[in-house]
Amino acid sequence: MASIKPQSYFQTIKQFRCTNCGGEISLINSRTRYIGCQYCGAVVDARSEAHQVITKLNQPSKYPPKSFIRLGMQAKFDGVRYQVLGRTCWRSLYKEYWKDEDGSGYSDETWKYDEWVLMSEYQTFFYLIEDEEGYAISTSIVPVYPNLLSNLKIKDFYSNSIRQVQEYGNSEVVFFEGESTYQIHAGDKVQFTEYVAGNSFIVETRLDNTGTAKEIEFFEETKISRNQLLTAFGGNPEVDKLLQLRTQRRANNKFWLKTFGFAGIIFLLLLFYSLGSGNQIFTQKFVIPQALDSNKISETPELLTLIRPFEVQPGMVKLVLSASFPDNSDAWVGLELQDSKGEIANVLDDNFFQESGTEYWQEDGESGWEDWEESEREKEAYYRVEQTDTYSGKVYVIPNAKGDVTVQFTVFQGSILSRYFMIAAICCGVGFVITVLAGIRDWNVM
């Protein structure tokens, strides 16, 4: 059993060994009649001297606790001390209400949940429901208007207004451990009906082995977060370790969030700077003449002019070719750049095209129409220069048939947007996402 701090209002009233497996069993509640052994699953008569085994449920290894909660742990809710006495595992087959634009109805669902029973220092009780969606405190209530399911509707226990039933069906016991005032068998069933009015309100009908109703209870369920539950169970050594670990992880997450945040700010500043073209260090315009005889246009590029020498410092360089056309024309232009040694450095070319008139087409074969217009084309490229050098070059063109084409070649120094920045952006983004997800996990973990 989990170690707990001794308290005068949670004294052990009886200790004995399980007659099935020999495991140590301690009783807290004076009204306990049966106890489920957490070591072997046997249900033992706690009041008899022989402590005979009444029945055996499923093996505990098949139904371990879903989280940190264990038998014997203490917790504090609203200033009142409680101790965990028992856990019942249920499997539900039920109908769940749904509604959307196509209609409404009930779907068939299955669910498993644990029901922990906690006893207060004043000998009062409540249930802690735990499932894959979280936790809820279930308290027995006395409704002003007690009633049962009727035609998928139910009257509100307090206002008597008609409510839509959200869930209804059967739950069956599959495992039990800890203390109970009544005998629990594997296969014990309850019928339940649930509606929602802020909190969830449930009516349960306990059935005997013949399927006859033998007891009806009403409950109100209030959701509670994992963090609230950890705080309530603080003081148990096992939970304190978890809280300490969570605090450390949160501190680590804050550190990494700050680190990635600072790196992100620096990256954004550099990215903002790099989005500019840098400093213009060279520009030259030239005109591609119209071919005199459009029927004799050669497909072989011709040397048009030379590019004047320009000096480039070490770093990133941006080269830009832009062109303006007469209507419905195209032209080809290419650059051959060479360094001071006469070696070819880079080639930048493009097949510029303009369609300033309006062209229509049917999109995706549907009745919608779209028009588009292009009046200018541009191509750019980035290069890294390792050392100061002087560059020059040649311009090759293929004349067009429609008229002169004006082309401008421009060089910018200091533009640093490159694949290194893309890699850095991806790394920062992935790191930030991982840190945030880790923070969310650690905030709700344990």
Image (cartoon, rainbow, N blue to C red):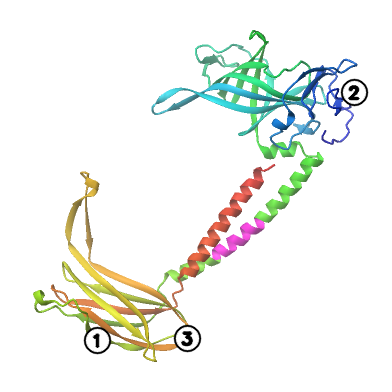
Q: Is residue 87 above or below residue 233?
A: above
Q: Residue 168, position in %: x, y? A: 56, 19
Which quarter shows the N terminus? top right
Q: Is residue 145 above or below residue 291?
A: above
Question: Is residue 384 toward the left or the right of residue 357 in the image?
Answer: right
* Distance of label 3 from label 1 (alpha carbons): 27 Å
Q: Residue 27, position in %: x, y? A: 85, 24
Region in magenta: 254-265
Question: Is residue 42 toward the left or the right of residue 440 in the image?
Answer: right
Q: Which residue is mark 1?
A: 305
The amino acid sitting under disc 3 is Gln
Question: Is residue 398 toward the left or the right of residue 139 in the image?
Answer: left
Q: Which residue is mark 3?
A: 387
* Distance of label 2 from label 3 (alpha carbons): 88 Å
Q: Is residue 71 above or below residue 367?
A: above
User: Residue 14 — which label?
Assistant: 2
